[in-house]
Amino acid sequence: MNNVSDSAVLSQFAYSEAAHRALGRAPALFIDGAWVASTHGLTIPVIDPSSGKSVGAVVDASEADVDRAVAAARRAFDDGRWTQLPPAARERMIQKLADLIEENCDELAELEAIDNGKPKAVAAANDIQLSIGILREMAGWSTKLGGELIEPSMLPRGTFHSYVRREPIGVAAQIVPWNFPLFMAAAKIAPALAAGCTVVLKPAEQTSLTALRLADLIAEAGFPAGVVNVITGHGHSCGDRLVKHPDVDKVAFTGSTEVGKTINRHATDTLKRVTLELGGKSPVVIFPDVDVQAASSGAAGAIFFNAGQVCIAGSRLYAHRSIFDKIIEGIVDAAAAWQPRASLDPSAQMGPLVSDEQFHRVMGYIEAGKKAGATVAVGGDAPASDGGFYINPTVLVDVAPDMSVVREEIFGPVLVAQRFDNLDEVAREANDSEYGLGASVWTRDIATMHQMAAKIRAGTVWGNCHAMIDPVLPFGGYKQSGLGREMGRAGVEVYTELKTVIISL
Ligand code: NDP
């Protein structure tokens, strides 16, 4: 694919000593508070997407490894070493973990850049800060998840005492994807720990480095052994084992809708509690009264941030017919700032895609779009490089609602753009998707904004911005974008069971 030329994207940026140390560690799993070798010694290479080169290895956990991790989490839950701690002590420990992430921000951002391909500066400013934010927000819930006193309604007052306890579910298996590795891990463990659950965390095979460093920090923060266990490996083997394990009480998953459905089916046999954060095809709807430059640059950021590898990426653009051409021109201009560069290049705003597989998947979608009749307004190709998985920011016009590029989650820097004439029409088109994760509406008209917010069937609607998330606000999907919510109060309550107590006095 990539012929190196004078203008090629080059990956010649040196790793720090800390990164070399992390990459040079013997592959190991974090089980029961200790680093242990796998039972079968298999590993998965760590590939730097900026160069395409193998730079390390992590364990490919065996089923026996998964069983050890689940057993450790089970013991840690059942003997009460975490659940029975004073909630304020749990809160302090989660806060301590957030402090340690803050102290190690630079190293964690670099590891994320090496492992995932996102620019280091973006990881430091976005991923690491969100990881700290979710841990701090959830730490506070440790002391605030009270029960409720409810008097029976059909019995004389004072004859019965009844109340509802909120209790931790138990052992949580948490399976996360590769697009925001540390943040996904933090967003999973934080509410589980606040609720009093114990955890087995499985990062994605492509991006395990920061989850492994997180395990170091968990040990340093003083969490009791077995409360958090981190196992690396493939989804079809160790992920599947976790989902089916009889000693796991709850599964929390972020990733593709296809795998989410499989996990939901497999968790049904033991009726595990399941939360799923799945795919999206989020619409960006631009009405004619906007500041065209601001809206174009917002739409460009909505799709090109993280090279489009974002579940809430604004991947379907609907611009009013009267301003469509100007908006496309604005996005094409803005795309210049999103030219891909190596993740350790300080000038990078967008890096390579995470893997060769993802590169080919996204290029396949672009080719399918062209073949179906779409026109490339910008991009549509890969820049020359010395081996990385780069794709230029791409905008496709002349697309039709039934094309795969319009209907399916591409998970790359690829925007499909369509025109609309009125509010009802665009609300219908925005909702014409099996997904319902997010949507943004761009207008200065307050009535249009609120009408659209009510009509759109998605877990989050943004006004004049896109993909803003905050640890206090619930996040999740309508339709096939997921089950349940993460973050905010709703995000911690999904790690609890309600127990009703009724006592005859
Ligand atoms: P997956 O959904 O396959 O992976 C997400 C996580 O699930 C990984 O940790 C993976 O492990 C694990 N997993 C995979 N299969 C199973 C299984 N049967 N049981 C338990 N765990 C499993 O995403 P991909 O990496 O394959 O990406 C494919 C597409 O998914 C992307 O192109 C994108 O469209 C979408 N995606 C969406 C995300 C989102 O946030 N909405 C995030 C990531 C991907 P492992 O990596 O080891 O296989």
Image (cartoon, rainbow, N blue to C red):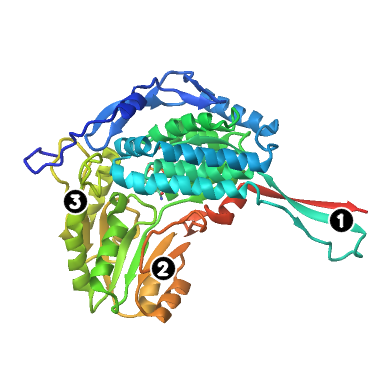
**Among the two numbered marks 1 and 3 on one chain, the one whose residue lies closer to the N terminus:** 1
Instruction: Tell me where residue 385 appears, x and y as whole percent.
Output: 15, 39
Q: What's under tag 3, amino acid-wise?
A: Gln
Q: Residue at x 28, y 27 (%)?
A: 55
Judging from the image, what secondary structure is the residue with disc 3 in? loop
Q: Is residue 288 visible?
A: yes
Q: Earlier in the sequence, mark 1 or mark 2?
A: 1
- Asked if labels 3 and 1 touch by Cβ distance under 8 angstroms, the answer is no
Q: Amino acid at mark 2?
A: Asn
Q: Residues within 10 Å of mark 2 (few under 14, many from 20)?
A: some
Q: CA distance from mark 3 to mark 2?
A: 31 Å
Seen from the viewer's position, the closer of residues 276 and 76 is 76
From the top left corner, tell me how far across and down residue 179 is, in percent.
Answer: 37, 45
Residue 68 sits in quarter = top right
Q: Residues within 10 Å of mark 3 (few under 14, many from 20)?
A: many
Amino acid at the residue labelled 1: His
Q: x and y percent of residue 354 in the render?
A: 30, 41
Q: Secondary structure at mark 2?
A: loop
Instruction: Say the numbered circle drawn on residue 431.
Output: 2
Asked if the residue at label 3 sits under 8 Å from ligand 1, the reply is: no
User: In the picture shown, does residue 421 fall above or below 461?
Assistant: below
Q: Is residue 330 above or below residue 21?
A: below
| Residue holding disc 1 | 161
**Residue 326 relative to residue 96: left or right:** left
Q: CA distance from mark 1 to mark 2?
A: 48 Å
Q: Mark 3 = which residue? A: 339
Quarter of the displayed picture in which ligand 1 can be seen: top left
Position above or below: 336 against 447? above
Q: Earlier in the sequence, mark 3 or mark 2?
A: 3
